[in-house]
Amino acid sequence: MFGTVLIGSDHALLEGLAQTLAAAGYRVTLADSLHDASVQTAGDPPLVVVVDRATALQSARDIGLHGLAPGGSVVLYHGTDDAPLPLPASLQRLTLADLTLPLERQRLVALVHSVTARARSRGHGAVGPEERTT
């Protein structure tokens, strides 16, 4: 099953998002940087990478090289107090959504669900929570 990687420095926010996604049935990995995320997910590429805008802007070249699973997507986020800076065109093309978190956490869950369903329908092997058996 493909997972979701949450990348950023706000550990409290990421932990809350991880709990929300886990409660919805998704496997989540937390990382401080794109490099840490790539090490943690080596051999098991994530379907969705959720990364804070500051990290994405610092590592715009590397975000596309991170290694998404087939059909995967990148979601950027920023806090409610952050002034969103313009994104380079290359990063805009990679980005499925730019969310204000934690306010849009339910939208994040919906996006992860949508990407998972899309990958599953295309035969990429992603399993969503509704297909799990216990």
Image: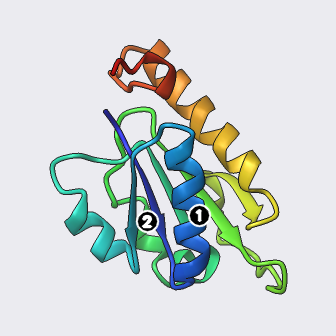
Please provide percent x and percent y for residue 99.
75, 61
Would you place residue 9 above or below residue 49 in this image? below
- Foreground residue, 57 or 11? 11
Q: Please determine whether, in this image, residue 78 is positioned above or below residue 123.
A: below
Q: Determine the CA span between mark 1 and mark 2.
A: 8 Å
Quadrant location, the N terminus: top left
Q: Which residue corresponds to mark 2?
A: 63
* Residue 84 appears left or right of 14: right
At x 71%, y 74%, the residue is: 78
Q: Amino acid at mark 2?
A: Ile
Checking the image for residue 126, the label placed there is none
Q: Quadrant of the C terminus?
A: top left
Rendered position, 66 above or below 83: above
Task: Determine which residue is flagged by label 1.
Answer: 91
Q: Nearer the viewer, residue 80 or 19?
A: 19
Residue 2 horizontal/vertical position (percent): 34, 38
Give neighbour class at mark 2: few <14, some 14-19, many 20+ (Cα, 10 Å). Answer: many
- Label 2: element kind: helix
Q: Position of residue 34 (x, y in %)?
A: 37, 73
Q: Residue at x 39, y 24 (%)?
A: 127
Three-letter amino acid code at the position of disc 1? Leu
Q: Residue at image x 58%, y 40%?
A: 112
Q: State the scheme by which the image is colored.
A: rainbow
Task: State yes or no: discs 1 and 2 in contact (Cβ < 8 Å).
Answer: yes
Answer few, some or many: residues within 10 Å of disc 1's Cα (few below 14, many 20 plus, some between 14 and 19). Answer: some
- Residue 124, quarter of picture: top left
Q: Nearer the viewer, residue 131 or 116?
A: 131
Q: Residue at x 69, y 38 (%)?
A: 110
Place of residue 8 in the rendered image (x, y in percent of width and height, measured from the top left): 51, 78
Task: Give the number of callouts.
Answer: 2
